Amino acid sequence: MQKPVTRRWTAAVVALFSACAAIAASAVIASFGASQQPAVSGPSSTSVFDPARTAFVVTDGAGGELPGCGAISAIDTLTGEVLYQSPRRGSRSDLAAAEDFSLFASGGGAGGDKRMYLLDAGAASPDEWAVRVFWSPAGPRQLNGSATAILNGDLYFGLHGGFEEGFGLGRVPLDRIEDTPDLQDVNPVEAVYSLRQLHLIQILPDPDGRHLHLLAQESRTPTSPTDVVETQALQIHTVDTTIMAARVAPQVLPPLVVSEPPGAGLREVGIHNWLQNGRLAYMTLLPAGAGGGPRDRWVAVNRLVAPEISFANIRGGSREAVTASLPADFTLAGAVAANHGWHNPGLLAVHGGDKVAVFDMDPLEGLLHERSRIDITPVVSSLLDDGRMMPGRIAWSADGSQLIVAGNEGTAEVLILDVGACGDTLTLRHVVTVCPYAEYNGLAGIVTANGSLPPPAPSPEACPTPFWMPEPWPVGSPFSLALPWVSAGG
């Protein structure tokens, strides 16, 4: 099992990403509105927690008070060492990061008072990093689910606004969040975007620093022990945060195929909510300019039990989604991650439950070509009595040379894979334990700096650039990373 870094070591390190130099984006994507946001700053490549080789993960909190369970952990992807673990303060789900990685957010849930945990990581030593809590008491505009994002000094999250507003997106300034529940008798929500009857599953900030892309999912429940829920509707809403409104109609996607067994969730209290309102659908942004248009913004979304990936241009051009089939031996399409790094550019990674594969893709035509794969031990939830295989998280390392993957190897829930030969090889490099609870390996979120760092000089040996990507390869924004990143589910 990997060990957390010692107090003696941590006292000597500088702050993670907090004292970073600004990295100007080399390409700024045109916004939906008339104005554009300034270029954002990203993590520094000189940090002791080198962003080029660091991944942050969070487990779902199962494992009681065991060290690392429910903690936010920093992992060196080259050595597999756990560099840091936050104090555990209850169950966590998913993970979001500020653009300079000085703040992380994780939490959510369903039923009763809810909470989200904020890790302030801007101090000069990780020993000084502190956790505070966003308390959300039961009532109108309460935190709902675990979709989370941090943007321009504000915390965004899924909420339930009551009968009139339904489900939606909430915003609260970070400086209004106190760590004392008595100070928050009501939910301090500053603004709301309503999704009506759709649950907010994931929030992806656009690299323009202004828009949020919301993955929203229907949440139909069985009406009897024999009822079968086959599909759940999916939509993508793009919200301008300056007005908390959408300027374009929602993008309708092919539905998520769940095919739950009869009466799923009626046998055990809370399990159905966990499945339906948790993270079954995953969205990833493709590199800016995919499709050839400067205003294009393509996404890829999984279809779960249907072994397919949907592609949609949510910013320009055709609004009709296209669907690509995975190989015939895939029985599950879990998390997806498009590579924004300088190694293996433009490849798509898919978590298939019992396998991980890397693909070339053509989002315009809806085509996938498998480059490599590796079999893994399936993640199976001990909470469900049918032993079904669960979708797992996946993310690219900062430079695109590795994948960080949800796994189930003994007590290890994190797998680090090397991606070589321009995507033609996948090799298991490390298995990492952050929560020593083998009965339920629940990796709930991953954040890396993929897409936010410039290539080193001299430039590494280049892999072929997909035809649908612009050249030269642009430096993106840290907002592109958090994929799973960020958010939602569990």
Image (tube, grey):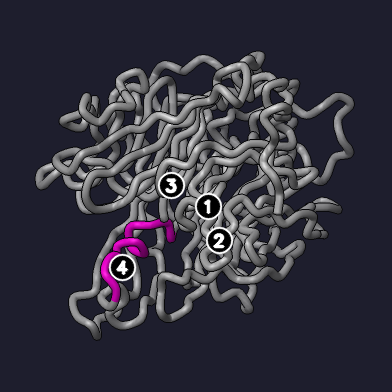
CB-based contact (under 8 Å), mark 4 and mark 2 = no
Q: Is residue 278 magenta?
A: yes
Q: Earlier in the sequence, mark 4 or mark 2?
A: 4
Q: Nearer the viewer, residue 160 or 458?
A: 160
360, 213: nearer the viewer:
213
Q: CA distance from mark 1 to mark 3?
A: 14 Å
Residues at circles 2 and 1 in contact by the CB criterion of under 8 Å: yes
Mark 1 lies on a secondary structure that is loop
- Indicate the secondary structure of the residue bearing disc 4: helix
Q: Tag 3, which secondary structure? A: loop
Q: Nearer the viewer, mark 4 or mark 1?
A: 1
The answer to whether 15 is drawn above or below residue 187 in the figure is above
Nearer to us in this view, 183 or 244? 183
Q: Which mark is residue 158?
A: none
- Residue 108 drawn at (x, y percent): 35, 45
Residue 5 placed where, x, y %?
A: 69, 36
Residue type beneath disc 2: Tyr
Taking 126 as reference, is 229 left or right?
left
Q: Nearer the viewer, mark 3 or mark 2?
A: 2
Q: Which residue is mark 4?
A: 272
Q: Is residue 85 above or below residue 410?
A: above
User: Distance from label 2 to label 1 (Cα)?
Assistant: 8 Å
Disc 2 versus disc 1: nearer the observer: 1
* Percent position of residue 490, x then y: 41, 55
> Would you say residue 465 is visible in this rendering?
no
Give the side of residue 276 with respect to residue 352, left or right. Answer: left
The amino acid beneath tag 3 is: Arg
Q: Residue at x 53, y 52 (%)?
A: 66
- Which mark is drawn over residue 92? 3
- The numbered mark at residue 66 is 1
Magenta residues span 268-280
